[in-house]
Structure formats: C-alpha cells, structure tokens
Amino acid sequence: EDQVTQSPEALRLQEGESSSLNCSYTVSGLRGLFWYRQDPGKGPEFLFTLYSAGEEKEKERLKATLTKKESFLHITAPKPEDSATYLCAVRVASSGSARQLTFGSGTQLTVLP
Amino acid sequence: DTGVSQDPRHKITKRGQNVTFRCDPISEHNRLYWYRQTLGQGPEFLTYFQNEAQLEKSRLLSDRFSAERPKGSFSTLEIQRTEQGDSAMYLCASSLGTRLNTEAFFGQGTRLTVV
C-alpha cells in the first residue's frame, strides 16, 4: 500500500531561522510529488510539483527537492506569514489510482516574530 | 474569481438528515475530485470525475454517499442519513486533463458538523 509520512508533525521556528520539512514515501511508480500549503479553515494551496529524483523547484523562501525515497521542503529565513500546515502528496501509476493524490498528515509550521 | 468554488462553506445538520454540497471547478478543467479531511490529517480521496463520468470511487465512499457531475460542469456530493462520523471538511479539487502528471487546485471546502 502506498504510504506518505511527513516529519516533524509540528515545527516552531524563530523568524529568520531556516529549516527543512521532510516527506518520505513508499510507492510504486511515482507519477508526481506535490507540495501544498494549508491555512486553518481553508483548502490546500498548490505550491510545487516534482516528477523525478534530482529535481528542484523554488518559490520565494521555499525550495522543494526530490530523491527516490523522500522530498524536502526547505524554508529559508521564514517570516510569520509562512506559518501554515504544509502537506505533501503523491500520485502513483498503479491500477485504479492513476488520478488520485495520497496525502501525508502534514507538518504544522509556526514562525514566531 | 477563477478558482474552485464550494457551497456552502459551513453546514450543521442533525444526525439522520441528508445534506448536499456543490462544487464549481475552474472552467476549463475536465477533471474533478472530492476529498474528505478530518482534523490533523491530510485529505483522503473520495471520488474522481473526468468530464461527466465518475471513474474512481474510494472504499471510504459508502452507499450513503453519492456524487454527480451532470454535463461535466459543476458537481454535487450528497450524504444521506448523516452520522456523527461524517463530520469533516469536504474538499473539491479540479485539474486539466492534458497529461497524467498535473496539479490539482482545491476549493475552500465545506465544513460539515453532524450533531
């Protein structure tokens, strides 16, 4: 069964303190790894898609990387407005699930001023 | 607003009542998904439409749940005889069907509380 595990569950950082969030996955036939940001009471907001090991994507203070077993979301010099839950999801090529996303439980990030 | 729209945003219902939620996807997107999210968890897949055809259903989708997407435009998710365990955020997402690897964009969700 496809599994996505995110760590840590919660992370508190001081403003400007860089860190990384981890998403490890056990799937067969990865067809894409997705990062989303979710604010309380709202739907997930798309951030990045990564397709193959070695790929990197950047957006403002965020950088996502992908290996064959895990992905990292690096946050450089975070600000309080980066506080949110960050969700990782995979899409796999196995029969019957070629379209759905399988999500991890998320990392709740709090950036203190 | 060109994003995914969901209505209502919040719904409180008594156990045993039926509820219906609506989702309007991004206009050019032919793929539409329903997910359910409980507190502290990531979204869980419920069902998927390509145009008007319902192509996948999760085992989470019991026979009390039904979804439709008439004419391949908006979609509705109905829950019959609601139970307290149905309390969750119901999320709709849509994507373009141009290739397999394409990101899904989510709506703001409908928060259901069954009392």
Image: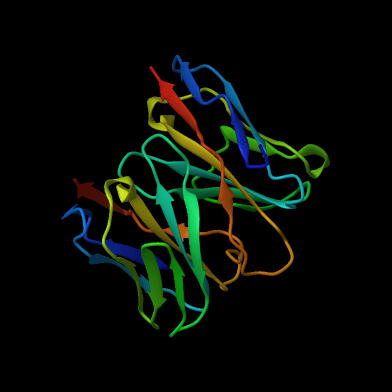
Residue A39 point in image, percent of width and height: 38, 42
Taking the spot 51% from the left edge, 59% from the top edge, the residue there is A101
Residue A1 point in image, percent of width and height: 42, 68
Residue A8 point in image, percent of width and height: 21, 60
Whether B82 is drawn above or below A2: the answer is above
Give the number of callouts. Answer: 0
Left or right of residue B114: residue B48: right
Taking the spot 38% from the left edge, 56% from the top edge, the residue there is A87
Colouring style: rainbow
Residue furthest to the right in view is B71
Whether B31 is drawn above or below A40: the answer is below
Residue A58 point in image, percent of width and height: 44, 69
Taking the spot 54% from the left edge, 43% from the top edge, the residue there is B61
Q: Nearer the viewer, residue A31 or A77?
A: A77
- Which part of the image, by quadrant, shows the N terminus of chain B? top right
Left or right of residue B74: residue A88: left
Left or right of residue A64: residue B102: right
The picture quadrant where one finds residue A106 is bottom left
Q: Nearer the viewer, residue B67 or A109?
A: A109
Whether B37 is drawn above or below A25: the answer is above
Left or right of residue A111: residue B20: right
Taking the spot 45% from the left edge, 14% from the top edge, the residue there is B14
- Which part of the image, by quadrant, shows the C terminus of chain B? top left
